[in-house]
Image: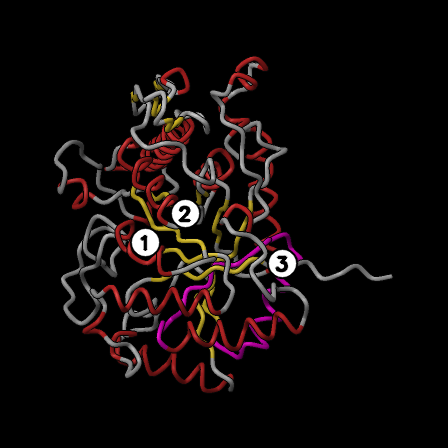
Amino acid sequence: MSSSPTPLHLAVALDGAGWHPAAWREPVARPRELLTAAYWTGLVAEAERGLLDFVTIEDGLGLQSSSLHGPDGRTDQVRGRLDAVLIASRIAPLTRHIGVVPTVVATHTEPFHISKAIATLDYVSSGRAGLRVQISARQNEAAHFGRRTIPPFRFEDYDTPAVQEVVTDLFDEAADHVEAVRRLWDSWEDDAEIRDVATGRFIDRDKLHYIDFEGGHFSVKGPSITPRPPQGQPVVTALAHATIPYRLVARAADVGYVTPHDADQARAIVQEIRAEQDAAGRAGDTVHVFGDLVVFLDDDPGAAEARRERLDALAGEPYTSDARIFAGTPVQLADLLQELSAAGLSGFRLRPAVVGHDLPAITRGLVPELQRRNVFRNAYEADTLRGLLGLARPANRYSPELAEQGASPAATTA
């Protein structure tokens, strides 16, 4: 008897009018609404109608740019954005099932602030929060804060020892950031709040814990001022393109987004992340590896490619991406996702080239096709994001039971 097809996880990455720089010029784009709550609410409602696991919301600490090194001075592309965590908190109460995962830049933000913000999002969403941790290596973004300098480097020099040292330090800092955040989420035991009016006891102070985190980049006393989130640990995700960020995924994340361009690359990347996971002492933990793809979807493959060419002409240059760019039909995309899944990917984060066109094509075209193949859910099967991803609610590292067992912090954060 043949085995059943492996179910896929599916997320979408939301960024302005879409991932193609000319997306805002499409008739469906609604550029005047990009900075409104209704715009974002509508996108996430559409994603939820498609039963997607979660949405990610892009963010940054500098203006969008076509340059990897800093501002590009262009005025013909979308510039300016809302804060991703605040967008997430606005839309979360208006949804019921889908996970909400805003981007957080660890390089210039404090773990205490982020732990409180994402814990709050988890309460607002009743257990559907996550975060996408990101680094910043741009000098202009560091200048907004004035507390550190980032040495200049070109992307072409990425493999040189000097640049590798800078990048390694930034990703080590991100790993420290996540560890401090995770400990702060655990700094209140689950039953720390008593709320007993008769005795006048609201909290049990013995169940609040100093985390006393001392890392190479942060020193955090704790405890948090926000009780432990409903999920215990909201879902931590990160985008990775090479060994150093793969190591961050393996050490600190529940979901890693990677950018293979074929099945062989996907297989090699998954193997590398699993090896790094083993080296980090997390071999027994579930760490999902999602493939990222930019998608142009139409019922006719020629129409999808023609739309891409028309948008390239509007932008004045061919669109390129770190991720594979797919232009074709939902059936063809379903074929590709299953091929990549067989190489070890457990899910996919799709980047709609034009949100107004390609997001509905995902939810109303791709999803029904995957359902016909019995590789995607027909209804939401869990109330939390961890539940949708098959991740158990972790025990609190500071609980007496784990403390007696001498459990390490890393062992309780998966």
- Asked if one can make out residue 46 in the rendered structure from this viewpoint, the answer is yes
Q: Secondary structure at mark 2?
A: loop
The location of residue 285, given as percent across then percent down, is 59, 36
Left or right position of 17 against 352: left
Left or right position of 6 against 182: right
Q: How is the image coloured?
A: secondary structure
Q: Nearer the viewer, mark 3 or mark 1?
A: 1
Marked residue nearer the N-terminal end (2 or 1): 1
Residue matched to label 3: 341
Residue matched to label 1: 88
| Numbered circle sitting on residue 129 | 2
- Residue range highlighted in magenta: 327-356
The location of residue 56, given as percent across then percent down, is 39, 55
Compared to residue 272, the image places residue 207 above or below, namely above
Q: Secondary structure at mark 1?
A: helix
Residue type marked 2: Ala
Q: What residue lies at 31% left-to-right and 81% top-to-bottom? A: 28
Q: Nearer the viewer, mark 2 or mark 3?
A: 2
Compared to residue 174, the image places residue 369 above or below, namely below
